[in-house]
Image (cartoon, helix red, strand yellow):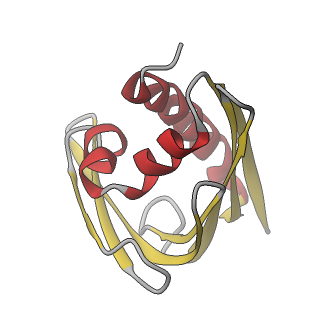
Amino acid sequence: MTTQVKIRRTYDVPAQRIYDAWTDPEQVRQWLTLGGTYEGTVRVGGKYQLNMIDDGNVKEQSGTYLHLDPPHLIEFTWFSTCGTYGKESLVRIEITDLGSSCEMVLTHTKLPEDKVQGHTEGWTQFAEILAKQVGSR
């Protein structure tokens, strides 16, 4: 059985700032890898490889960008040996412009049931790290 994670977070920055943090390779490296690496081509059909450092261990993720609609939507596949048991899952990031702020809804689907809690905790942590990265409270 597979299931999903949904994280909702408001940032007091414009939507474009959040979109850029997810799509600019240097910014992704700064906040999403925890000191690891990111390489990728951010375009529909482009591939990425992300290596996070977690408690001294390298966790590899990879995937393909499926949809990019600046500054509102980013969708990509998410594949990892330990986090999804080598099966492809899907991450969708919807960003709603609220004027001087925005709301981000991250939905991660097709996850193994026993990996939902860990991904919920992880994405919640990364939503907070992202807030610091973009200068939001």
Q: Is residue 67 above or below residue 94?
A: below
Left/right of residue 26 with respect to residue 15 in the rendered view: left
The number of numbered discs placed on residues in the rendered structure image is 0
State whether residue 17 is above or below residue 91: above
Residue 118 location in percent, x, y? 58, 42
Residue 54 position, x and y percent, is 30, 39
For residue 39, side relative to residue 64 (left or right): left
Residue 68, located in which quarter of the rendered image? bottom right
Outermost front residue: 99
Please tell me which residue is depicted at 54% across the width and 65% down the height of the picture.
Answer: 84
* Left or right: where 82 falls relative to 98: left
Q: Quadrant of the N terminus?
A: bottom right
Query: In percent of the image, x 50 and y 82: which residue is there?
Result: 44
Residue at left offset 55%, top offset 27%: 13
Please identify the residue farthest to the bottom as the structure is shown: 45
> Which residue ends up furthest to the top in the rendered image?
137
Q: Nearer the viewer, residue 35 or 131?
A: 131
**Residue 61, image x and y in percent?**
38, 64
Identify which residue, 130 or 115, lies in the foreground. Answer: 130
Question: Quick check: 44 above or below 72?
Answer: below
Is the C terminus in the top left, top right, bottom left or bottom right quadrant?
top right
Q: Percent x, y for residue 57?
A: 23, 45
